[in-house]
Image (tube, rainbow, N blue to C red):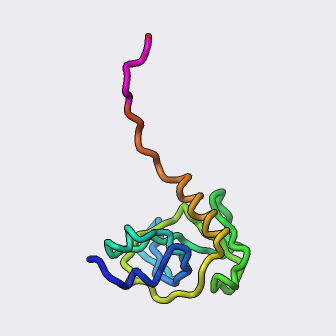
């Protein structure tokens, strides 16, 4: 159900949420960054990407947050765009900060690079 709660969490907002584990039916309270825009918010949802400590084992797609304090984080951290979730905004526990524009742009570019493209249609028959 659409809700106005989503309006307070624009893309790049760092929030605390109960983030689902990918390998079991459980969740952990952790920071995440809102990566969805107005179209998702209008439907009453938010897409979020996991934030984890920079000391954890790195994945190739991790994006370092150079100003972790400015983002509301207590320790050096990375955004892990490989791990995203769709939640209702009511599950957002609180807002803690915002990614700087350059880091946010890297996150959005990283997500874009991982999303599949629509198959192209053939407009003509192949030549023998």
Which residue is found at the position 64% from the left and 82% from the top? 71
Left or right: where 117 falls relative to 57? left
77 vs 35, nearest the viewer: 35
Instruction: Report the quarter where the N terminus lies.
Output: bottom left
Count of number-bearing discs:
0
Which residue is found at the position 65% from the left and 84% from the top? 73
The relative height of residue 25 versus residue 117 in the rendered view (above or below) is: below
The relative height of residue 38 versus residue 15 in the rendered view (above or below) is: above
Magenta-tinted stretch: 122-127
- Which corner quadrant of the image does residue 98 belong to? bottom right
Residue 126 within the magenta-colored segment of the rendering: yes
The relative height of residue 65 versus residue 74 in the rendered view (above or below) is: above
Instruction: Report the quarter where the C terminus lies.
Output: top left
Predominant SS along the magenta part: loop
**Where in the figure is residue 23, as x and y percent of width and height?**
46, 65
Left or right: where 87 falls relative to 81? left
**Where in the figure is residue 99, as x and y percent of width and height?**
62, 76
Which residue is found at the position 38% from the left and 74% from the top? 41
**Where in the figure is residue 46, as x and y percent of width and height?**
41, 73
**Where in the figure is residue 111, as x and y percent of width and height?**
54, 59
Residue at the top extreme of this rendering:
128
Which residue is found at the position 38% from the left and 69% from the top? 40
The relative height of residue 52 versus residue 61 in the rendered view (above or below) is: below
Left or right: where 99 falls relative to 17? right
Residue 74 within the magenta-colored segment of the rendering: no
56 vs 12, nearest the viewer: 12
111 vs 38, nearest the viewer: 38
């Amino acid at each position: 159900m659409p809700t106005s709660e989503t309006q307070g969490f624009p893309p790049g907002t760092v929030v605390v949420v109960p983030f689902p584990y990918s390998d079991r039916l459980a969740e952990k309270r952790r920071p995440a960054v809102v990566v969805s825009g107005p179209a998702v918010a209008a439907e009453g949802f938010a897409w979020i990407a996991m934030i984890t400590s920079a000391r954890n084992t790195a994945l190739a797609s991790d994006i370092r947050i150079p100003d972790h304090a400015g983002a509301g984080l207590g320790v050096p951290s990375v955004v892990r765009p490989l791990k995203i979730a769709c939640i209702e905004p009511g599950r957002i526990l609180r807002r803690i900060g915002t990614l700087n524009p350059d880091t946010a742009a890297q996150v959005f570019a990283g997500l874009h690079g991982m999303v599949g493209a629509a198959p192209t249609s053939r407009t003509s028959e192949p030549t023998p």
